[in-house]
Image (tube, helix red, strand yellow):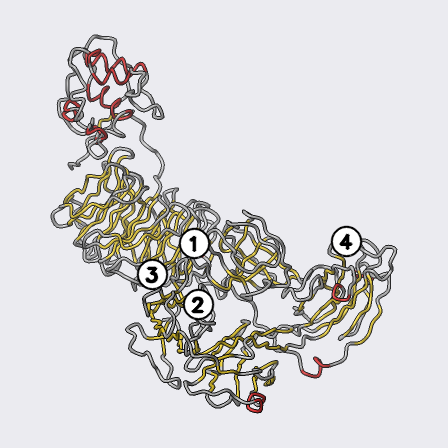
Amino acid sequence: MKHFIAVVVSGLAALPCSAAAPSYEREIAPILRVYCSGCHNDRDHEGDFSVETFAKLRQGGAESGDPVAAGDAAASVMIRRLKSHAGDHMPPADEPQVPAADLAVLESWIAAGAPGPAVDASILQSLVVPQLPAHLGVMPVTSAALAPDGGRLAVVRGRVLSFVPAAAGKPAATPPGPTTGVELPWRATAVHFSPDGTSYVVAGGITGLCGAAELHDAATGGLLRSFGGHRDLLYDAEFSPDGRLLATAGYDRSIRLWSVSDGVLVRSIDVHNGAIFDLAWHPSGSMLASASADETIKLWRTSDGVRLDTLNQPQGDMFAVVFTPDGRHVIGAGRDKRIHLWKLVSLEAPAINPPVHSRFAHESPIVAVGLSVDGQHLLTSAEDRSLKVWSVPDLALEHDYPHQPDQVSAVTALPDGGFMVGRMDGSFDTVSLAVDPASPIAPAIPPAQPPVAAAARTANPRPVTEHEPNDRAEQALAVLLPAEIKGRVARAGDADCFRFAARRGEPLLMEVNAARSKSQLDSRIEVLDAAGNPVEQVVLQATRDSWFTFRGKDSTQSDDFRLQNWMEMELDEYLYAAGEVVKLWRYPQGPDSGFWLYPGSGKRQTFFGTTAVVHALGEPAWIVAPLPPGSRPVPNGLPVFRIYYENDDDPAQRLGADSQLVFTPPADGDYCLRLTDARGFGASAQADAFRYTLTIRPPEPSFTVAVEGKDPKVSPGSCRELKFTATRIEGFAGPIRIDVANLPAGFTFHGPVEIEAGQQQAIGVLSASVDAVEPDKESESAVVVKAMASVAGREVVQEIGSLGDIQVAAKPKVTIAIASPDASSVGQPPDEPLVFTIRPGQTITARVKAERHDFKGQIELGGPDSGRNLPHAVFVDNIGLNGLLIVEGQDDREFFITAAPVAKPCRRLFHLRTTADGHQASLPAVIHVLPAE
């Protein structure tokens, strides 16, 4: 069998002492290869000079000419440059230098006439190596492939390709010995069958020298053709889905597409900055993906080699890439221990394919992946011998297999849904698809229990007076609930403990009133079980690592949280830092911004009873998934945080230094509340200086709503905003509907509007007709603003007053309107608002039109908040540094609306508002968020 690579194998010998000319092949070529060919080869010919062949060496550079003066070493440019102490010295000072012994060999060769080789071949396709004894054990499995008919398995170990009979997709029990099968001319790294099963390709090469792929007949094993041209080891060779093209890539950073039928090179793609470890074809054959050591996965249009996207979110070498069988997603994994999943939005035109998941999966780099035949399960293996299977596309852990005998280096999907795994110890085996009934790291918390009955909520708390000794749980003062306890922290380090009975799932509110009553106490409360142990509230498993990248954060700031790896984060995810848990509310908008945290304005809110603290620049932080108390998550290389029922300052930051905690008992029984000063302080000379009132009772969820924009002045034919802000009390998180009734003639409130569940604000618009007149006091007083919500199973309606003095303002200088992308719907009747539809993860376009009555300047429409009253996780996108605006001299512009993946289905009114002419607003349009596809 002939191969395109010539390998010279012999023992290394010392330089002979005779006067015979040194051998070019054995002594000169190795020197040129080590010290010169890195910069001077046929590909990187610096100075137009290559030493890759003898002919190219003697041809010399464009300016210096032949560097060898045969018979006169001192006159040779090569020797002069090697010995020079000036700026023309070669190799450069920061590169390895030619040793004196090798320099003497070069001089001897030139003095002897510089004889050339018998056959002038590239010095990068031949190698002089010492002869080594054969490996006696079983070589590692580096690749495996199942024939399309499922009848046999091709297994690569080192330089041996073996074929193993397979029954129902399962290999034979006894692996072949190291000498069984086809011996290859070089170490192989990949094997794949053609789609029709008539041939197979095996790829590999010689490290640092050359890479090649060979096409063999599947029936006879005969060599059909070779695909060379690579300057280093190949890591992969993949058939296109129709079998007409072959893609090869490896350590030389080059992708080559070949015609399988005749071996002709179709095109070469040389853009990666690191080795290419894996290739994958899209099921359509129109796209190729490449995974590289430059920490990217790149997508290519195969018809012309155009790069369609660079998926650059990974933070380490990418070792594996695969498309899902439906062609809708691409998955990558590698050194950063994560599984990355992107949604494909375009197969033909360059586009940004959004990341969907970046899941920390293992405690060490991921080395191999396999996608099940149906595309619903992903098997991953890591350097630490761990093996796990994940659901696709949500990447939830389905099963953690026992640690393997050795690292799994090859994964092949089997028709029955399982996988074949090959290991570094040379063994291979089948693993069945195992899906646990409940994933041990599924990000889920048990559903909240229904609110307590109305009678229990309204019961009057029993007065209790605290007395000593009650420092320890076993000394706790027994109290009947609901209770209102009057007490004081008597001394430094004092603790006051109170024992109470509670029922599983029935929440209790624990609140301290001290600082609000001018006490010096900075309270801290915690819940213990009957034995005095802390009660676990939630387990938080980190799923992504991060840190603060721009300035520290004080304990109240809710905006501009700039975090490393922020592109991997999603809205409504929890962020843990230094014991505090917060929740991501809005994406960064532009390069000079960070996340906004809940509640979206004012002081930030914390979760799980944690307390807001100061954070330093560079301080570590983690995105965490909440798990039920007592969970033992599968390790993924990131920390696990156990949060107990305790609180220093109330999570909403409305009570100052006073504590507030909602405790949901995990079981019926006795519990203990321990109250201390967070600083360890206590009373000294003033006995009542550290007094407090502690209330323990069922929560009484409720809300209040404030109106911003009263006494509105509305221009005829235009609109003004009304903003409604809710204060949520004692755990109420449901939606709140706002409406305005009994408006004077000529005025319309476009509603009702809704404050979404868990959110704080809604913004509506009040419009005046072109013929509106100033209302009288009687009609103004008839206006009623109502807030309605379902609280603890009952409908609550709150009248929150009128709008005050409603006035007709001067004629507007500018009016704005929302239009469809082609601007065809300007002037839409108020009772028939324009409707836009969008799905989670989608971006749509719209237009804003301006009518300039007496205004010539630029019309500013806001920054990140430019989409007024859009649903949570839906926002105006791509606003740039200057925000959304219509420049001077123009009357309209296109804008973009994006729905984040977490956006929930709804119909909602939204509008735009300009800062021009006293904040004129548009009539509302409807955004209809459809369910995710």
On the image, numbered disc 2 is attached to which residue?
866
Q: Is residue 699 left or right of residue 158?
A: right
Q: Nearer the viewer, mark 1 or mark 3?
A: 1
Residue 680 image label = 4
Residue placed most toward the observer, 153 or 482: 482
Q: Secondary structure at mark 4?
A: loop
How far apart are labels 1 and 3 at the CA level?
A: 27 Å
Rendered position, 240 above or below 700: above
Q: Nearer the viewer, mark 4 or mark 1?
A: 1
The three-letter code of the residue at mark 4 reads Gly
Residue 728 image point, x, y percent: 61, 73
The three-letter code of the residue at mark 1 reads Pro
Earlier-in-chain disc, 4 versus 2:
4
Earlier-in-chain disc, 1 versus 2:
1
How far apart are labels 4 and 1 at the CA level?
A: 43 Å
On the image, numbered disc 1 is attached to which residue?
591
Residue at 30% x, 54% y is 309
How far apart are labels 4 and 2 at the CA level?
A: 47 Å
Residue 649 image label = none
Q: Which quarter of the figure has residue 460?
A: bottom right
On the image, numbered disc 3 is attached to which residue?
329
